[in-house]
Amino acid sequence: MKNFVCLLGILFTIIACSTSSKNSTEINNPKSTAVNDTVRIANDSLEYEVIIIDNGFSFWLSSQALPRNYYSLTYLENKNQVYVTEWNNRVLQPQRYNPNLYEMTIDYQSHIRYGYEVNYLIYNYMIYFQNTYKQKLAGYVPQR
């Protein structure tokens, strides 16, 4: 099994445990909950969990983010790969970028099928992060 632990903003964690046979499996029926400013998505069958804790994110997600299925899964995966790559570059340059914003690298692997809900959540956090903290990770940032 592989464990991937990642941090975004104040706290954003992906823990994905999967075997190579599960890597191509689509994540089905994830459970999503929001408590205060915590958003959690979990799927026991693939043993992954995403937790985002950032003041205002859950409100922003419910009030400003475009609805689920607005974007295709391919679009979200491609955008997340670009955003995560730039994020990781900034983590490695604490003298240039605020280390309080970019605390840890994100181990987002394009060959793992995280499914729509995980990609939707990561993408929307990246948009929220860029707009809230006045950062530009790559290209055009929607002003939602």
Image: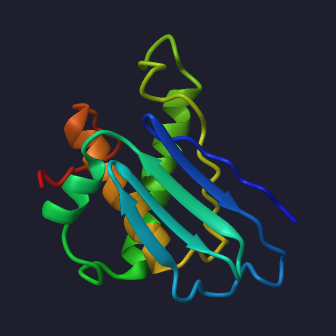
Residue 34 visible from this viewpoint: yes
**Dividing the image into 4 quarters, which one contains the C terminus?**
bottom left
Residue in front for this viewpoint, 128 or 94:
128
Q: Position of residue 42 (x, y in %)?
A: 57, 70
Q: In the figure, is residue 136 to the left or right of 98?
A: left
Q: How many marks?
A: 0
Q: In the figure, is residue 18 to the left or right of 56?
A: right
Q: What residue is at 28 percent from the left and 55 percent from the top?
A: 58
As displayed, is residue 88 above or below residue 36?
above
Q: In the figure, is residue 112 to the left or right of 36?
A: right
Q: Position of residue 133 (x, y in %)?
A: 26, 31
Q: What residue is at 22 percent from the left and 37 percent from the top?
A: 132
As displayed, is residue 7 above or below residue 64?
above
**Dividing the image into 4 quarters, which one contains the N terminus?**
bottom right
Q: What residue is at 37 percent from the left and 61 percent from the top?
A: 34
Image quadrant in which you'd find residue 32: bottom left
Q: Position of residue 6 (x, y in %)?
A: 61, 45
Q: Position of residue 109 (x, y in %)?
A: 64, 61
As displayed, is residue 139 above or below residue 120?
above
Residue in front for this viewpoint, 58 or 4:
58
Residue 79 visible from this viewpoint: no
Residue in front for this viewpoint, 36 or 24:
36
Q: In the orientation shown, which residue stands out farthest toward the top?
A: 95
Image quadrant in which you'd find residue 16: bottom right
Q: In the figure, is residue 31 to the left or right of 106?
A: left
